[in-house]
Image (spheres, rainbow, N blue to C red):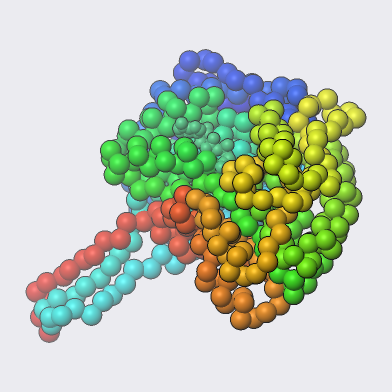
Amino acid sequence: MADLLSQLFINGEWSDAASGVTFGVDNPATGETLTKVADAGREDMQRAIDAAAAAQPAWGTSVALERSQIMRRAATVMRADIDHLARVMTLEQGKPLDQSRGELEYGIGFIEWFAEEARRIYGMTIPATSREKRITVIKQPLGVTAAITPWNFPSLQILRKLGAALAAGCTMVVKPAELTPLSALEIGRCFHEAGLPKGVLAIVPGLDPVPLAAAIMEDARVRAVSFTGSTEVGKLLMRGAAETMKRVSLELGGHAPLIVFADADLDHAVDQTVAVKMRNMGQTCVSANRIFVQAPVVETFTQRLVERLQALKVGNGVDPGVGVGPLVEDAALDKVERHVADARAKGATVVLGGERVTVADAPGRNFYAPTVLTGVNDTMDLTREETFGPVAAILPFDDEADVIARANDTVYGLAAYFFTRDVNRVVRMTEALDYGTVGVNDASISAVQAPFGGVKESGIGREGGPLGVDEYVDVKYVSLGGVGG
Ligand code: NAD
């Protein structure tokens, strides 16, 4: 397709990979290859880091208002081009067009919010213990930073990191997921059009992440790595960061419990469950993996959930009215099938879906029916591992203590949700859940101004809000002596 970008964006220019090699980007709905993209290797990433290091002194000492204005211009360019950006995302990733547009709106919101925050990176003045001294604290940009991002939110995951880094005065090299490089390259284009100085941002896609990550991790000039992806890779990067003592910000896997108490507003709980379970076909780190429903309302809740999921249209994300697109690749379906088969074998009942579906006019094989399983218990694989698919697993529970213990019984700690009308329970549950983000009568937790992140093996650091900027600054304490007075 003619209007798809296919070259590396390094030092404000578009180039082929040094090796001249390219790799194909496929449309998961049709199986067709959309385009071939330059396949960066270590040498290309090195060039991007060199350019970032050269750009860092000027960018890091620029006036906050200048950075803010460039960021706002980039947001304006993206908003003006949102239909094209959404189409590119749906073509390479599969999600329905309105969800692609929603992701872009949210991602651009980070750029706008951080453009404002750039002007509020304040230091401190602290009373000294001697009349001779003055103590101040200033915040300075870390320097060159790197982002390694996943395919499930191809634009958002970059924009959230980039917004905070640019606001703080850091340059950034981005290694996008190999399945979704096109949306990433579009971000490079938009910032370039907005007048971002050359070298401040690089987009360096490649099929093999290992040499690209090695170039980043081994270079002492890169002061921070912000990674979103699997816990397994996050651990590798954290180990690698020790060598040059880089800061790491890790947004890793999740296994969110969604808990519905018998006193909840059931219709609202069902609405929110559908939204959080089916967004991006269930391929999100905050997806409700375990839906705990209190015994007296299990039947009613399940029935209403099934009615809602049955009504969703499965199809090619570019077609109007589609609520559920294809999963991103064949391996993703294999995992969903394995989880459903394992649950069945251990006694779960499939009350809706439970199989692949074929879609007329979309020859890809990646479609899976919205699925509801009942009678799920804690021995099943899907209660331990992320399913990353449109499968709603319902687990009955008896009381609050029981459900808190089961909800916390996981290595993950990213997001949790619960629904109740009891205000005292709201306080107890909020405090007892071992998660970085808790939704109370709410499973739509996305907010640019809030600190998103996990505890336990879901990661380290926070993205969004004022804490998001802190990931990209060094704190310098200045002790001034001999002042007198
Ligand atoms: P992944 O870890 O396989 O890949 C993420 C990125 O890391 C990609 O760019 C990939 O190329 C790169 N990568 C893969 N192997 C690498 C290696 N050995 N060294 C360096 N980089 C490597 O994850 P994925 O399958 O793309 O994404 C799904 C995972 O991401 C899920 O676990 C999901 O929960 C998690 N996720 C977390 C959040 C969050 O905010 N916490 C958000 C979205 C997704």
Residue at 71% in and 59% down? 396
Q: How many marks?
A: 0
- Give above or below for 319 relative to 21: below
Look at 62% across and 34% down and name the residue there.
180
Residue 75 % position (x, y): 61, 52
Q: Residue furthest bottom?
A: 485
* Lateral position of residue 108 relative to residue 226, left or right: right
Measuring 62% from the left and 70% from the top, which residue is drawn there? 400
Q: Position of residue 245 (x, y in %)?
A: 29, 44
Q: Residue at x 63, y 57 (%)?
A: 257
Please name whichever residue, 295 or 233, is drawn nearer the observer in this view of the structure: 295
Question: In the current view of this chain or complex, which residue is farthest to the top?
Answer: 20
Q: Is residue 31 above or below residue 216?
A: above
On the image, the x and y values in percent for residue 262 come to: 75, 71
Classify residue 430 by image quadrant.
Answer: bottom right
Question: Is any part of residue 317 visible from this angle?
Answer: no
Q: Position of residue 475 (x, y in %)?
A: 30, 60
Is residue 396 visible from the viewing direction of this image? yes
Task: Name the quadrant containing residue 134.
Answer: bottom left
Say whether residue 213 is left or right of residue 4. left
